[in-house]
Image (spheres, coloured by chain):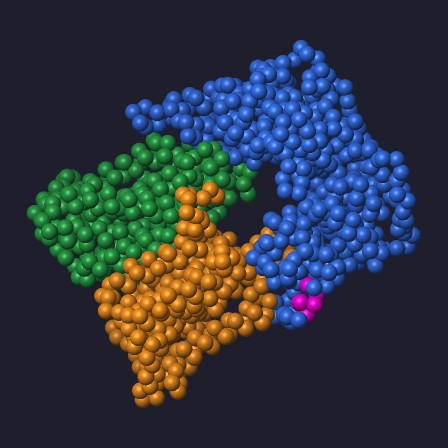
Chain colours: A green, B blue, C orange
Amino acid sequence: MNEKYRPLIATIGVFIALFATGGMLYNNFLSTLVLGNLLTDSSYIIITSIGMTFVIISGGIDLSVGSMIGFVGVCMANLDAAGWHPLASAVLMLGFGTIFGMLQGLVIDFCEIQPFIVTLGGLFMLRGSCFMINLDAVPLRHPFVDEFANVAISLPGGGVISSSAMVMFVALFAAILIAHFTRFGTNVYAIGGDRTSAALMGVPMRKTTMGIYGLGGFYSALGGVIYALYTSSGYPLAGTGNELTAIAAVVLGGTLLTGGVGMVAGTLFGGMILGLIATLINFNGSLNGAWIMITSGVLLFIFIVLQRFLVGSLRMGSNSA
Amino acid sequence: MWAAVLRGLTLVSRIQLKAISKSFPGVRALDEVDFDAAAGEIHALLGENGAGKSTLIKIMTGALQSNSGEIYLDGKPVTITSPADARRQGVNAVYQEVNLVPTMSVVANLTLGKQPRRFGFVDWSAAKEFARNRLKRLSLDINVDRMLGSYPIAIQQLVAIARALDDDTRVLVLDEPTASLDTAETKMLFSILRELKAQGLAIIFITHFLDQVFEISDCITVLRNGKAVGTVRTSKTDLHGVITLMIGRDLGQTKKRKYNTHSNKDVPMLIAKGLGRRRTIAPFDLELRKAEVLGLSGLLGSGRTETAKLVFGAIKHDSGTLMYNGQQMSGNSPRQSLRLGIAFCPEERKAEGIFAELSVRENIIIGLQMKRGWLNLLSQSEQERLSNEMVKALSIATPDIEKPIGQLSGGNQQKVVLARSLVSKPSVMILDEPTRGIDVGAHAEIINLIRKLCEDGMALLVASSEIPELVEFSDRVMVLRDRKIVGELVGSQITREKIVQTIAGGN
Amino acid sequence: MRAIFSHRAIWPVLALALILIVDGIIAPSFFAIRIVEGRAFGNLIDILYRAVPTGIVALGMAVVIGTKGIDLSVGAIISICGAVIAWRIHAGDPHVVILLLALATGLLCGLWNGFLVAILDIQPIIATLILMVSGRGIGLMINLLYGGTDPSFESALLQGLSVGHIWLVPTRLVLAAGIFLGLWLLMRKTALGMFTEAVGGNAAAADLAGINSRLIKYSAYLISGFCAAAAGVILTADTHTSDPVSVGMYIELDAILAVVIGGGSLSGGRIYLGMTLLGTLVIQTLTTSILTSGLPPEYNLVVKAFVVLVVLLLQSNNARGLLFAVVGERKK
C-alpha cells in the first residue's frame, strides 16, 4: 500500500517545502490568510485539473478544458443578462459540459482518432463559440454573485475558506469517491494501466471512455462556473492556456502522463504548488511573471525526469517491458 | 473417443472435442481433431508452431468457431459462442502474457468489473475478502492491497489463474504458464495445479518444456500440421516417443546429397566462444565457415531465435566473445554486424521486419542504404534496378515496386525482407524461419536459394522449425534444447531421427 | 471509387477545392489579383502570405511526427527567438549575425528537446511540454536583459525578409519556398527521409536494419527547432517587436492540424511535406474566406474546428464506413 501513496507524499512534501520557503523569505507568509487566498485563487483551476486527472489516468488528454472555462463564463454572463439566476445557468452549463465531453469521448472511441486531435477540435469549437457570442467581457450582475462571494468560513489567523474553495473541496471529495469507490473509477485506472488487458478483462471501453471525457467536461464546466462567479464576469478569453496549467497540475500531483497511476488528491496539491509559485513570485515585487513560467517548467522537468526513472522500478516484475 | 478408451472408462470426460476442423483462407488449421480431457486430469497439449494448438484452444474458449465438429462438456453437447460464453459454461483460459493490469492492486485486478458494492459504492473490505478467498484456493496468501506489478511474474500468473477460476470452473486452460518462471516458481505452480486437479478440474496444459510435461501431466496429446497424431498416457511414453510424434518420422529414403565438407585449414568466418546471455541462452561455441549452411534446430522455445540474434548482435551477450574474420568484435550491435557484412532476416516480419507504409522498393534497399550512410542516396534508377532484380529472383508477387509493402501477402513480405539482406551482398547471412508464412510451393525456391548462396561462397546460419527442410539444406546442424546447445550433427548424421535423438537425449 | 477516397491525400485537395469553389460562388472577385507599386495584392496572395509562418512550422512538425513524436514547444521557441532578436538589436549586433543567432537559438531548443526524447527516452508529448510551459517565461526574461521597457526595434534586413517583396512576390513566400526546397532536398535527396519514416513506422525493424534511431529522432527535433526559429524571425519582424507572451499563440496546434490534414499520421511513418503545406493552405484559406465573406471574424475558430473535424472523420475508416453504409453501424 505504501508505494501507491509515495507520489502523493512527495507532492505534499514539495508543497510544504515551498510554503516553508515562503515563510522564511517573507514575513506574514505562514498565515491562514495566504493559505486561504491561495485556495480561493486556485480553486477554479484545481477543479478543472481534477477532471483532467481522470482523463490522464486513462491514458488520454483533454485540450478543450481551458476553452470550456471561457465558454461557460460567457454563457453565464449572457444568461445573467437575460434574467437567469446564476445557479440555474450553472446547472445548465454543467449539463452542457458533461454532454460535450461525452461526445468527445464517443468520437475518440468510435472514430479511433487520438484524443489530442479530437479535444483540439473541441478547443477550437468552444473558444470560437466564445468569440461568436461576445467579443468583450460581460459582467454578471445578479445579486447571487455577491452572496456567493460573501459565504466564507473564517479560520483562526484571519484567513477564510471562501465559497469557491468549499465548492472545490466538495468536488474533490466527489472525485475521490468516484475514482476509488466506484467500478467506473477502477475501470479508468485499468484502461490507463493496460488498455489491451482492460478490454480483455471485460471493461466496457466505449461507455467508460465517454464517461471519462464526460467527467472531464463536467469538471471543466464547473471550473468555468466558479471562475465566472469569482471574477463576476464572462470573458471570452478566459481560460486561455488553462489546459496546460491543468496538465501541469496533474503531473505535479504525481499522476503519470502515460496513464494508470495517479490520485486526484495529488492534483489538489499539484494545483496548489502552481498557485504557490505564483504567490511567491508576486510577493517578491521585483520578479516578474516570467519567473512563474520558468519555475513551473523547471519543477515539471524535475517531476517528469523522476517519473521516467521511477516508472522503470514500478514496472519491474511485470511482463510488459 | 478412442482416447477415452485408452484411458479406461473410469475417468469422466470433462471436455471433449470431436472431429473439429477449422480452415482459414489458404490453410487448414485443424483437420478432424479429436481431443478429450477428463476431470481430475492434467492433460498436456503439444505441438510445434503451426501445428494448430492455439486454434484448438481458441475454439475451446469461444474465441473462434469451428467449421465442423462437436464439443461436449461433461458429456453434454454444447456450443461456445464467445469467450464470455465459455466462462459462463465453465471453461476458463489463462495466457502467457499475464493479461492483467500491473499498475492496479491485486484485489482490484481480481475483482475488476464485479466488485461487491454497498449503497452503490465499492465495498473494498468485501472485495478484499473475496480476493483473499480466491487466492486461498491456490494456497496463496499475499497482501492484496499491493500493486500487482510489484510482485514477481510467478505470483502475477497465479493471480491471473485465481481470476480465471470461478466457483463453477470445470476446465482450466493454461497456455505456456511456465514460460517466465524459474525452477522454484514452476514447482510452486505445479503443486497448486495438483491441488486443483484433486478438486476435480480438468486442466489443459500447453507448453514447450517437455521435461515439465513429464513432471506434471497425466496425459499428452500431440498435434502436428493440424492433425492429432497421438494421445498417450504420460506414464506409457517417453521423451523420444513424444518428440517423434511432434516431428514425425523419416519416410524411408533420405535424399542423397553432397555435403560441403571442410578441411581443417579453412578458417571460420565467424567464431563465437562461450557466447551467452543470462536467462536467455547458456554460453555456447559456434563456428561459421564459408560456403556452408549451419542449421539451428530445436523445438519451439528452445532458443533458436535468441541464439541467432545473439550472433547477429540484436541481443547483447553478457558472456563470451565473437570474432569475425579473425578480428574480435567488441560490443556487437546490428549496425556493426551489417557494416561487416553480416545480414539478418528476422522471424517476426510484421513486428521486426517490414516498414508497412514504405514501398516494396524502399523496404528492399533500406539495408543497403544504411551501409552507404544517409548522405549517399542510391539513385532512383539504381534502386529500381536492384528492386526489380530481387523481385524477379525471389518471385515476389507484387504489381509494382512502389506498392506499400503492407498490402502484400505475408509470404511475399517475408521474401522482401529476405531481399533486403541479399541486396547488400553480405558474406554471412543469418536467417530465422525463412520459410515461415511462405506457401508450401515456394518453400523449394527458398531452399534452392539457400543452397545456391552457399555454393557461391556465403556462410549461412539458418534457424528453422521445419526439420525436413533443415535436413535438406544444412551441412551441419546444431541442436538446441531448453536454451542450451545440446549437440552437433555433421553431414550424413543429419537426419530427422538423429535430431530427435539429440533433442531427447541431450542433457 | 472507394479506393480513391481511401487515399489520404485526396482530402486536403478536396477540402481546398471545396472552399475555393464556395468562395467563387459567394464572391467571384475573391480570386482577383491586382498589381500595385510593383507588388501583387489579392486574397490568394494574402492567403499565401499569412500561411507562411504556420507552414514553415508545420514542415518541421511533419518531420517530428514522422518519427512518431510531436513538438508542442514550437510556439515557445518562436517566443524565445523573438526575444533574442530584440535583445541583440538593442545590443547593436549586425543584423545578419542576429538572423543567424536567432536560427541558432532554434537549433539549441531543438537540441534540448532532442536530448529529452532521444537520450532520456521521455515521451515526446511530455518532453516538449516542458519547454512549452517555460519557454515564454524564458522569452520574457531575455526581454528583461536589455531593460525590457521597449522591445520594439527597427531592422531593414529582418523586416525586409518578413514584409518585403521581391518583384511581385512577398519575400517571405520565397523564404518559405526556400525552406521547403531545402527540407525536401534533405529528406528526399538523402536517405534521411526514408530513415525517419522507417524509425517512426517500425522502431524495432529500424534497429535491426542498423538505422541509428537515436540520431534520427534527434535530428527531427533539430529540424523542428530550426523551422520554428525561421517562423519566429518572420513573425517577430512583422510586428517589429518582441512579445513573448502572445507571439505564435496556438501555432503548434495549427501546425499539427496541418500535418494531419495533409495525411500525416500521429503514430508515425510517412512524411508528406507538400501535403502538409497544402494542409496549411486549407486552414489559412478557410480563415481568409471567412474574413472576406462578411461573416464576423469570430466565426473563424468554429468553422475551422468544424472543417477540420469533418476532414478527420472522413479520414477515419470507421466514420467513413458509417457514412457509406446505408444500413446502420458497420461492425469492425
Residue visible at 89% across and 47% down in the picture: B257
Seen from the viewer's position, the closer of residues C288 and A305 is C288
Q: Is residue B31 visible?
A: yes
In terms of image quadrants, where is residue C105? Answer: bottom left
Seen from the viewer's position, the closer of residues B262 and B283 is B262
Q: Is residue A37 above or below residue B94?
A: below
Q: Is residue C80 visible?
A: no
In terms of image quadrants, where is residue B214? Answer: top right
Across and down, in percent, residue B163 comes to 50, 26
Please name the predominant secondary structure of the magenta segment in the image. Answer: helix
Q: Is residue C61 above or below residue A45?
A: below
In the current view of this chain or complex, which residue is farthest to the left?
Answer: A143
Q: Is residue C14 above or below residue C233?
A: above
Across and down, in percent, residue C193 comes to 56, 65
- Range shown magenta: B382-387
Q: Is residue C44 left or right of residue A40?
A: right
Residue visible at 23% across and 54% down in the picture: A70
